[in-house]
Image (spheres, grey):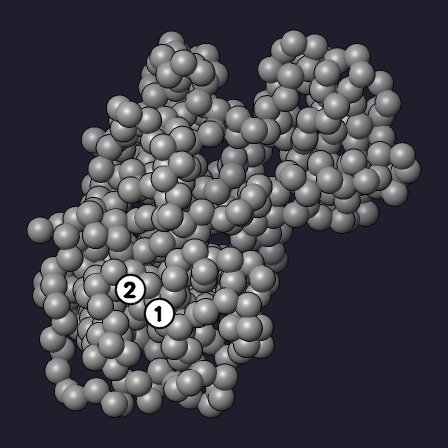
Amino acid sequence: MICADLLGQRSRLSPDRVALVEVAGGRRYTYRELDHRACACARSWLYGLGLKRGDRVGILAGNRVEFLDAFFAAAKCGVILVPLGTRLTAQELATIASDAGLSALFFAREYVDTVRDLSSLAPAGRLVALDADDAGGELSYDELLASLPEGDHVPGPCRPEDPHCLLYTSGTTGRPKGVITPHRQVAWNAYNTVACWQLSEDDVSPIFTPLYHAGGLGAFLTPIILAGGRIVLHSDFDASEVWRTIESERCTVVLGVPTIWKILADAPEFETANLEHVRWFISGGAPMPRHLVGVYRERGVVMRQGYGLTEVGVNCFAMSDEEAWEKAGSIGRPLMFTEARVSDPEGKELPPDEVGELCFRGPHVSAGYWNNPEATAEAIDKEGWFHTGDMARRDSDGFYYIAGRAKDMFISGGVNVYPAEIENVLLQHPSLLDAAVVGVPHETWGEVGVAFIVPAADHAVTPEELGQFVASRLARYKIPREFRIVDELPRTPYGKVIKGELVEWWEKEAQNSEFGIRNSE
């Protein structure tokens, strides 16, 4: 029976292979050792805390081995894991805790104050401190483990449709929704990624993106564990440390988001790091500018682009090394047994090169949203198609390209404008470090574009220069009517620009020049 206990299955086959390297402490764990830890965690939930299948356990922590213990424990015993975003406020966490109905909350020492505030706002169940010297919990994780009798027995296996995790969306545009991620979805994402990305036990992959996000858990963690490869776990992102690790651990496949790839390319180690063992890098989370693909190509590294959503599995497309450059800007072709289509507003599939909503159907699609049947019905239609809200097109060769979020599109003079297309052009300008475009109201045209730009250090740029730069590459109606300088763009942990904040900035500051340069026409 298919379930998410990939670690348990792999440990039977490769017990003595190294599964995990913790960068912070240098500790190396074999598959047997890692699986033993997960079994102990599951037993602590069931027999130490008295939890049962279907109960929800929250975890508020950075990247550490105990996070993996909890993730794989949930795969073994049927308790549902609820990873919590470490950047969220106590109020935001309280909303999630109330919605999920937590029976217990495990937390790291750096969040003790947040947990205290959270507990005053909403029930969070039993509080368990992951660090032994932390007095913020009712008991420590070590104490909980020590109270159990010896043994590895846990109930199982879980059924394919049993929930494994509740992964809450970022909530950048409203109340966060808990995505019900069943065992079937976790396992299928791993199997299909291994097959279509051609991963093997020889692959080594670092994880420096947050584990509380679907990308950290599903993009390489579960596929590499399934294949019997090795995960290198960073506690957080540090460009120099990442380059050192890629070299010392001879990493073969690496996931990042465009912001991270830009930071890594700007790091001094970029030009000198030994990358002979690298098979390819891959970018996700947001569109990857073609010029940045070229930067890595000049360094001799293949840069692929991927696509996924929490609701449909984080890996939905694949491409070869050759296609990564020939089709730069594309997210590839759909994985095997992954139905994808570009649809018009009535749900009819569109022909090649027409922009519409990207929809999916298949075993990689989630079971919907926790306690929210209305949102589930809105996202998954009667034929089982999940509507992503992302606009895309498919070329005649079957490769897909993301045009942007449907909610980001604006209509100027009756014509649809997709900000992602303009942003990709702006990011090719040598004086810009970052850029994002939003649509705002306009008396004549209905809506026009406003570009928020982050200039590179010691670089000056004018609106006229930027306007001419865009005009030489795109139609005139796509040229932003204003260019505003900001120190940085507001982004989620996985690199997506929080465009609602940009619109709010524009609305508040429309009458002054705090942001710098602007064009009125």
Residue 336, which numbered label? none
- Res 323 quadrant in image: top left
The location of residue 168, given as percent across then percent down, is 44, 51
Q: Residue at x 21, y 87 (%)?
A: 148
Note whether residue 257 is visible.
yes
Compared to residue 132, the image places residue 231 above or below, namely above
Q: Which residue is mark 1?
A: 103
Task: Give, as a three-letter code, the residue at label 2.
Answer: Asp
Can you tell which quarter of the image residue 231 is in? bottom left
Location of residue 45 in the rendering, given as x and y in whole percent from the top left corner: 26, 74
Q: Secondary structure at mark 1?
A: strand
- Can you identify the residue that label 2 sits on? 55
Q: Residues within 10 Å of mark 1 (few under 14, many from 20)?
A: some
Q: Quadrant of the C terminus?
A: top right
Q: Position of residue 393 (x, y in %)?
A: 44, 19
For mark 2, give the secondary structure.
Answer: loop
Determine contact: label 2, label 1, CB under 8 Å: yes
- Taking 60 as reference, is 310 above or below it? above
Upstream in sequence: badge 2 or badge 1 = 2
Residue plotted at (61% across, 48% down): 491
Q: Look at the picture and state if 194 lies above or below 207.
A: above
